[in-house]
Image (cartoon, helix red, strand yellow):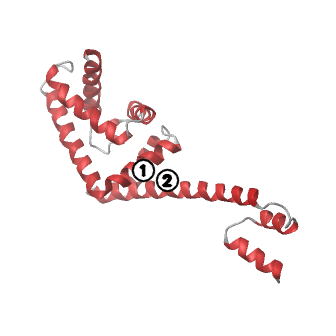
Amino acid sequence: MRRLYRIVAMRGMGFPLDTIRAALDHEGEDPRPAVRDHLARVEAQARMAGRLRTRLMGVLDALDSAEEPSGDLFMEIIEVMTAMERHYTPEQLDGLEQRRVALGDEGMRRAQQDWAELIAEVEAERVAGTDPADPRLTPLVDRWNALVGAFTGGDPGTRAALERTYDENDPQEVSRGAVTSETMAFAQRAMQARAQGS
């Protein structure tokens, strides 16, 4: 009965059966290595669950903001998210999620509004035929860089992953329609001109 109680107690904490058997067969030995191993597994599972939760919330947010949610749109969102996540390390994804949580719903809405206004201004300059090197674009480029900095937390690796995501995929798909490939290319040329002129 004592052995059975211990088995039930350890199973209740999620220990696998082989670890339980070893612990009970060697009760006099130091159990800390087994506990540390199990804790590492639990923490890895928690990180995976956290990332899955973030992905599901992102999918739901995209479906909620769509005019006509559908199975096709659901699959498109999954494909875009999967393509994006290939470019980030797990640590970078964790950092993005931490910043999203810190911003909260209101902060996220403000950030999306800031992006929408900035992209509209950049698009207007592109349509007007403004030279990407025109100094009038400097304030727009600085705002663009500030918003990217806020999204990436100023981490160069995360920024590089973000840039690869847009370089290797259709910007309109990645941004869920927020920015066209033409506007993104124009913004990138303006940023290059700003970097060369500074």
- The kind of secondary structure element at disc 1 is helix
| Circles 2, 1 touching at the beta carbon (< 8 Å) | yes
**Which residue is depicted at the point 83% across and 63% down?**
22
Q: Say which mark, if any, is on residue 51.
A: 2
Give the x, y percent position of residue 85: 47, 43
Where, quadrant-wise, is the N terminus in this rendering? bottom right
Q: Does 138 sit above or below residue 175? A: above
Q: Quadrant of residue 40?
A: bottom right
| Kind of residue at badge 2 | Arg
Whole-number angstrom distance, CA of label 2 to CA of label 1: 8 Å
Q: Say which mark, if any, is on residue 97.
A: 1
User: Which dot, 2 or 1, sits closer to the camera?
Assistant: 1
Image label count: 2
**Which residue is depicted at the point 71% across and 60% down?**
35
Is 94 left or right of 188, judged from the image as shown? right
Q: Say which mark, if any, is on residue 160.
A: none
